[in-house]
Amino acid sequence: EVQLVQSGAEVKKPGESLKISCKGSGYSFTSYWIGWVRQMPGKGLEWMGIIYPGDSDTRYSPSFQGQVTISADKSISTAYLQWSSLKASDTAMYYCARLSGDSSGYYLDYWGQGTLVTVSS
Amino acid sequence: SSELTQDPAVSVALGQTVRITCQGDSLRSYYASWYQQKPGQAPVLVIYGKNNRPSGIPDRFSGSSSGNTASLTITGAQAEDEADYYCNSRDSSGNHLGVFGGGTKLTVL
């Protein structure tokens, strides 16, 4: 059974750093891209970026380039999303998801349960 | 990058058919995928590719595409189908990224 299990909720202060995780199981972790998706309170889904754990090739959506860092440790089948200096506007639910598909289109077929990040002074 | 446009809200009477649409230039080149999200839950893939349903998704859900518009159709909507629905497509920039539509809130009356 394919599963993506994310780390637990976090409460942080502005300016603090944070790294959240997404552990995959039940499939070849190095053979699929993993995507990170942001959902701000009461808002829609936003594509942040993707990583290919096989070689750590990483792509960022323009809005998130320079704002976050996506990484992966294939030895433990885990992808990460990190911030060096959090802002209140980073308060959101963050999902990881497995990317499948081909040249005709991609889709996110398995999702983590989400990690709620709250940034407040 | 690309943009995908969805109607913010749609309603349907119980047991009737409803179509949720998604428009964007990238849909001329790539299939859309559709996600259902209920309050407090992670999104769930309901349609992908030309018209494919993951295991466990009822066959009342179907997808279609024409030109720059992709559609998700629910034939015989049930109360449990009330949710937010998001379309997604591959970004036409070629960097393997994607883009989501703004979402459609479906109300089953």
Image (tube, helix red, strand yellow):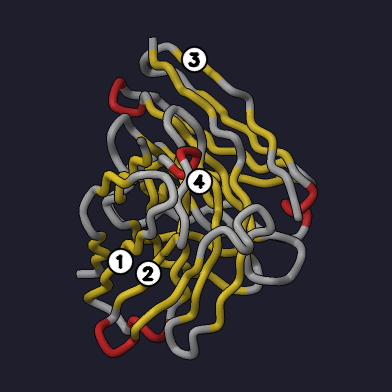
Dot 4: what SS? strand
Q: How far apart are the alpha carbons under marks 1 and 2? A: 6 Å
Q: How far apart are the alpha carbons under marks 1 and 4? A: 22 Å
Instruction: Name the chain under label 4.
Output: B
Residue bearing mark 1: A22
Residue bearing mark 3: B11
- How far from the left and from the top, in percent, is residue B22? 65, 38
* Mark 1 closeness class: few <14, some 14–19, many ≥20 residues within 10 Å: many
Are discs 1 and 2 both within one chain? yes
Looking at the rendering, in which quadrant would you find the C terminus of chain A? top left
Q: Quadrant location of residue B3?
A: top right
Residue bearing mark 2: A80
Residues at badges 1 and 2 in contact (C-beta under 8 Å)? yes
Are discs 2 and 4 both within one chain? no
Dot 2: what SS? strand
B69 relative to A100, above or below: above
